[in-house]
Amino acid sequence: MHEGKISYWQMAVLFQVYMTGSALINIQGPLLAAAQNAAWISLLLANLIGFIILYLVLNLHNQFPNECYVNQVRITLGNIWAYVFILPLILVILYITSNIVYGMGQYFTTSMMRETPLFIFHLLILLTAGLTAKAGIEVMARMFHLLMYILLFIVVIMLILPFNVYDFSNLLPFAPLGFKPILNGMYIGFGFPYMDILFFAMILYLVKPKQGQTINKWLYLGLFINGIILSLTIICSILSLGSLVFLKKFPLHVLAQLISIGEIIERIEAIFGIALILGSFMKIALLLFILDQALSTLLKVKHLNFIYIIASIVLFLSLTMYKNEIELGESGSVMQTAVTFFFGFLPLLLVVVISKVKKRNRKQMA
Amino acid sequence: MTEKIIILFIIAFLYFDFKAIKKEKKLKRIYLVLSVPAVYLGYSFVFGKNLPNLDELFYFLFGPIAETVISWLKV
């Protein structure tokens, strides 16, 4: 078990960068393609499901505050079931981490640095994220604090500066194709980013408990803010580009290209690139840390020994899984939700129900 | 090809935590097991082979279910 413990506020910051980090850049494209004008409603509905997942995670955390999710499963169901549930979950986290790395690499090789080989971006971001994760949770908590402010500042600037091109009539017609596309968008949002809340349960126990206070309200508030920020980015993308935005993979990048104030502030999409690197870097570092946490707790060995080898597996996975960004898009929009539902959500639900029943039985026996 | 092999060596050098492996026998065994997918995927990357991968495993398990759901949701 880790000795490092962080405060409630630091944990809330980590949760915010974890949830908002890469989603801030990657979620608009798939959601707008699926739900069009109603994409922001899809996101808010997915956010609502995120609250259910967070409720389940916090339920387990409040029952076993000093244990990570792996040990919570082990205590509730036994050692064999812990292996049955956690090994597929580790594969899912590897898959999602590789998707995030590939998404970042694809953005650069298709829009900014077309001649540079993909593996250069993947290698550099995984090297940096691996070294950061190896430094431990306290270092990440301190470091990401400042980076979160920079990331949010860039996003707010990018949403405010193109105000002169916003056209509110672009928001209509609302849901012209009915309710099904909204559900489709919600399906995508469930797989990414909201099922990622479960993976965060691996590091939730690293918070320093305070008497008379719980982490719950901080995380619920964080999730609410996440929903508001992400839906605002979608609304602003629709306001500026109208129906053109449904074809764009990175609407915020296009939004940044539209900024033109007095011919002085123009073409600031490179700033968007910085936000993308920051968001992806923080999310990947946290996911590597979570993977190490899951693996070492499952195999009962000391933590922080597997980060580099996990990073190398993620690197090769990200370089070999997809041939182009269309394959990644299909994987993210179709497969990710199904995989996280069967290997993440259902086991979580089962563990919560069984732990509740066991707790009630213990009370009755007493 | 040559640049990919050079990258592979750099990755092996950077990513294998030799200090960690030296500490415990159990860690050595786990590292050995974890090296198998790393070497397999590294081989697939360097030689450009289209070997079975994690996304195909997931597609095999949940592909039909996911596609049924998506076809129901698409207008």
Image: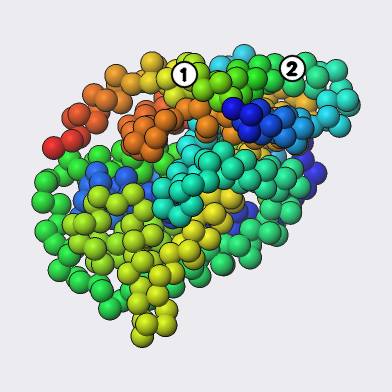
Q: Comparing marks 2 and 1, which lies closer to the viewer? A: 1
Reading the image, the residue beneath label 1 is B50
Under mark 2, the amino acid is Leu
Under mark 1, the amino acid is Asn
User: Could you classify mark 2 by the number of other residues whose Cα lies within 10 Å: few (under 14), some (14-19), or many (20 or more)?
Assistant: few
Q: Position of residue A131 (x, y in %)?
A: 72, 45
Q: Where is residue B66 in the image (x, y as percent from the top left)?
A: 30, 26
**Where is A296 relative to B56, above or below?**
below
Give the structural element (helix, strand or loop) at label 1: loop
Q: In which quarter of the image is residue A40?
A: bottom left
User: Could you classify mark 1 by the number of other residues whose Cα lies within 10 Å: few (under 14), some (14-19), or many (20 or more)?
Assistant: few
Q: Where is residue A132 in the image (x, y as percent from the top left)?
A: 70, 48
Give the structural element (helix, strand or loop) at label 2: helix
Q: Mark 2 lies on which chain?
A: B
Q: Does residue A365 appear to the left or right of A267 in the view shown?
A: right
Whether residue A143 appears in this view of the structure is yes
Q: Marks 1 and 2: in contact by CB < 8 Å? A: no
Residue nearest the viewer, comparing A122 with A359: A122
Please give the name of the residue rendered at 58% of the width and 50% of the height, measured from the top-left corner.
Answer: A281
Please give the name of the residue rendered at 19% of the width and 70% of the height, measured from the top-left corner.
Answer: A168
* Marking on residue B32: 2
Residue nearest the viewer, comparing A217 with A135: A135
